[in-house]
Image (spheres, rainbow, N blue to C red):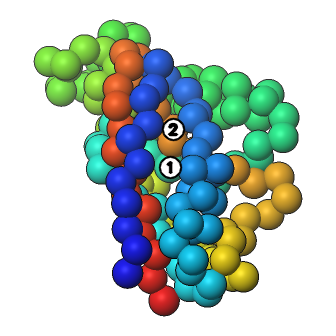
Amino acid sequence: MPQTILTLPTRGQGLYEFTDEAGSFVRDADFETGLLTVFVRHTSCSLLIQENADPDVRRDLDRFFRRLVPPSDDPSMRWIVHTQEGPDDMPAHIKAALTQVSIGIPVADGRIMLGTWQGLYLFEHRDRPHRREIVLHLGS
């Protein structure tokens, strides 16, 4: 079964689209029908399928999660114990636990079956830049 690892650089918290890269992988694999499994190999970021037409959606989602899970130095987060890697670390793990690290997307006619306005995103939850590894695997 075709498989690859996509390395995606991030510049800090936010959503990073990689729909085109996933689509190219499926096309290049000459894979007609099956399932694309997407898996991120980290515990402080996650994956989303979300609207890719209006950038306000990405900004609003990012702001929502920042408000939902503020940094550990925020007074509301005094209960957090894991703080050795900075105030963004444990909140990043919480955000990843609330979202997903693996997504399955149907493949038909040699292309991923996302809807018209859907995009595939890495959701970075850490403040500093990272190089994230995303496994793309095609199966039937």
Vertical order, 66 against 102 (above or below): above
Q: Give the CA distance from mark 1 to mark 2.
A: 6 Å
Closest to the observer, 59 or 37: 37
**Residue 66 at x, y percent in the picture:** 54, 24
**Residue 56 at x, y percent in the picture:** 80, 28
Amino acid type of the residue tagged 1 in the rendering: Leu
Residue on which disc 2 sits: 123
As drawn, the residue found furthest toward the left would be: 84
Mark 1 touches mark 2? (CB < 8 Å):
yes
Number of other residues with Cα within 10 Å of mark 2, as a class: few under 14, some 14 to 19, many 20 or more: many
Of mark 1 and mark 2, the one earlier in the sequence is: 1
Q: Secondary structure at mark 1?
A: strand
On residue 47, the disc is 1
Q: Give the residue drawn at x 45%, y 82%.
A: 139
Closest to the observer, 85 or 3: 3
Q: Give the residue drawn at x 73%, y 64%.
A: 114
Vertical order, 97 against 72 (above or below): below
Vertical order, 135 against 71 (above or below): below
Q: Give the residue drawn at x 69%, y 82%.
A: 108
Closest to the observer, 23 or 37: 23
Give the side of residue 89 with respect to residue 68, left or right. left
